[in-house]
Image (tube, rainbow, N blue to C red):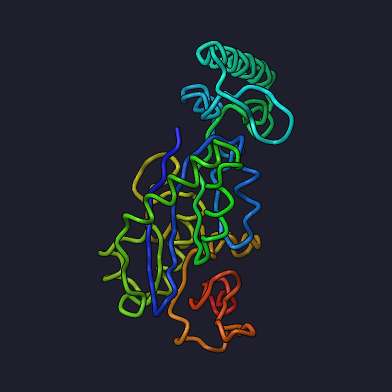
Amino acid sequence: MIKAKVIESSFNDENILTTVLVTYPRIVHAEMLRHRMFSSSVSSSRAKPFSRFVEEEVAMPVLWQLNKPGMQGGDIHPDVERCMDEWDKAAQSAFMRGMALERLGLHKQIVNRVVEPFTHVDHLISATEWDNFFNLRMHPDADPTIQAVATAIHDVMVDDYLDELAEKEWHLPFVTKKEREDHAYETLCMVSAARCARVSYSNHDGTNPSIARDVALAKKLIDSKHWSPFEHQATYAQHVNDFTHYMKDGSVWSNNFRGIIQYRSLIDNVD
């Protein structure tokens, strides 16, 4: 199962900031995290009950290629069904060992590690720079599974509708239009950060969020120095020039965002 969805997209001048939620097999997660121009928040296997992994679809490679020298696989195996069956047997064995560890009373942060190669991950990505990622990961030499992930992201971004950042002022993933009308951006940035930390608009139990609880969670994240959820919110660069950085070519940068100020750069101003 590989799927991608644009959560929010914004532009000013020639700069486009896109936040995408993508689900993919965890076997390529380490490679996804190599891209330093990405701001990332990821669903944690430490937080998820082991029973939920057992109920979900087993994550598998997208192609079953024959062995050959080098990093790229060869032709497709003549018995794909057998390959999938053997992979599924490995997954069921891992889940059985996980159940045994759970019965011993071990915490899910230990138990869940046993089954990670057979699970999916939800990955929230915000970035203004995507070309290098697409050039590398959609290339025929890339791992077929990560090719599929990159293609899914590329396709939803091509079809997405952009909102002008100068008009709405803030890029705020997981914040609704009604909430933007009812609350100040100082509150909404915190709300967005809390939801980005959960990688979801809703709470972990599926219930609707609360502005007050989301703000409280964001403050806890700040107190614990957990900064990554505050990298997804951004505003028009000309509003806060004191927080920009200029490259030799005259480009304006805020951390890994071009031409758009990342909320993490402003976090010292949060009460």
- Image quarter of residue 109: top right
User: Residue 178's spot in the image, x, y percent?
Assistant: 25, 64
Q: Is residue 107 above or below residue 161?
A: above
User: Residue 110's spot in the image, x, y percent?
Assistant: 69, 31
Q: In which quarter of the image is the N terminus?
A: top left
- Image quarter of residue 223: bottom right
> Residue at the spot x=64%, y=20% of the render?
98
User: Which residue is at the front of the view, 113 or 214?
Assistant: 113
> Residue at the spot x=60%, y=84% of the render?
249
Q: Quadrant of the C terminus?
A: bottom right
As drawn, the residue found furthest toward the right would be: 69
User: Which residue is at the front of the view, 206 or 25?
Assistant: 25
- Image quarter of residue 113: top right
> Residue at the spot x=65%, y=60% of the render?
224
Q: In this view, does 31 lie above or below 27?
A: below
User: Residue 2's spot in the image, x, y percent?
Assistant: 45, 37
User: Residue 67's spot in the image, x, y percent?
Assistant: 68, 23
User: Which residue is at the front of the view, 71 or 29?
Assistant: 71
Instruction: Tell me how many marks there are.
Output: 0
Left or right: residue 170 compared with residue 199: left
> Residue at the spot x=62%, y=31% of the render?
116
